[in-house]
Amino acid sequence: MSMDQKIAVVTGGAGFIGSHLCERLVCEGYRVISLDNYFAGSSVNHVAGVEYRTGHTKDIASFIPETPDIIYHLGEYSRVAKSLEEPELVFDLNVVGTFAVLEFWREKKCKLVYAGSSTKNVGAREDGVVGRDLAPYTWMKAMNTELVVNYGRWYELPYAIVYFYNVYGPRERTIHEYGTVIETWRQATEKGEPLYVRNPGTQARAFTHVLDTVEGIVLVGEKGEGDNFGIGTDEIFTLLQVTEMFGGEIEMLPVTASTRQSAEVDSSKVRSLGWLPKYHLPDYIHNSKVSMQ
């Protein structure tokens, strides 16, 4: 390693988005250190040139004695409905772990890019429940974004907060309740199984390719300061529209306590840095179906 090579720490670096981010940062010339507890990450996602360290983010200071130039904190629990069943686990990973990351940031005095949750911007449902209050995951993520903002102000630390919108693409998670929707439906289509959709099916989502997402993260890491860097495409589809792109049988499921409509997508801040999405969900689904034939 050259003396002037910058160090980037990526928590969750063996995960879906994190692995693509690590790969991109290596290409950018960084020395990249991944910290992952492999709750959702996998060694299958390892990419050449990255230093992988296995551990919980609450122990980040023990695992990473180096002083990084930038921390990308993606390593948190990230399922809405499932979090209702395991709030203690969410608290451990997203509150205890993230607090330790913020203390590490405070000690190292580098830049932090934190992956917030766009669910905090979902408006009230008919019952008056807003996005941040849907589930333990959404509430803790919203609280964490506020804590990041305050740490930045209290300790005069540089930071930026990014928000993802239904990311899809290669290495997407497929592990049952923790799986992401596009890959879940892709595999169901491949197996000839029904595609399950929560009622009413008109829930709208801005599906954003992982490479477009990573492009936005890197731009924000280089140039962004502050909150509200939404990285989301303007192409909005309902869940039923997406399942119809896949084709096959659709089965509707009951509404759950965490069922929500779409968050408002505001990507103006990241677009001001030069970000423009290049990928389109219909093309991805079409190519996926062709590869199955």
Image (cartoon, rainbow, N blue to C red):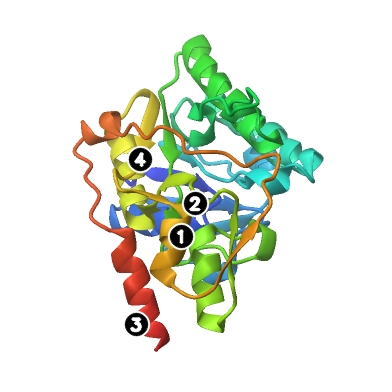
The answer to which of 173 and 177 lies nearer the viewer is: 177
Q: Which quadrant of the rendered structure holds the N terminus?
A: bottom left
Picture coordinates of residue 200, whole percent (x, y): 56, 48
Residue under label 3, please give it. Answer: 290
Nearest to N terminus: mark 1 or mark 3: 1
> From the viewer's perspective, is 212 left or right of 52?
left
Nearest to N terminus: mark 3 or mark 4: 4
Mark seen at residue 50: 1
Q: Are marks 2 and 1 in contact (CB under 8 Å)?
A: yes
Q: Amino acid at mark 1?
A: Val
The answer to which of 219 and 138 lies nearer the viewer is: 138
Residue at coordinates 47% horizontally, 12% vertically from top-left? 153
Q: Nearer the viewer, mark 3 or mark 4?
A: 3
Residue under label 4, please give it. Answer: 231
Nearest to N terminus: mark 2 or mark 1: 2
Label 1 to label 3, Cα distance in Å? Answer: 33 Å
Q: Amino acid at mark 3?
A: Val
Label 1 to label 4, Cα distance in Å? Answer: 25 Å
Q: Nearer the viewer, mark 2 or mark 4?
A: 4
Q: Residues within 10 Å of mark 3 (few under 14, many from 20)?
A: few
Residue at coordinates 59% horizontally, 73% vertically from top-left? 194
Picture coordinates of residue 23, whole percent (x, y): 38, 59
Label 2 to label 3, Cα distance in Å? Answer: 37 Å
Mark seen at residue 33: 2
> From the viewer's perspective, is 37 left or right of 271?
right
SS of the residue under disc 2:
strand
Q: Amino acid at mark 2?
A: Ile
Name, please, the residue furthest toward the bottom.
293
Nearest to N terminus: mark 2 or mark 4: 2
Label 2 to label 4, Cα distance in Å? Answer: 24 Å
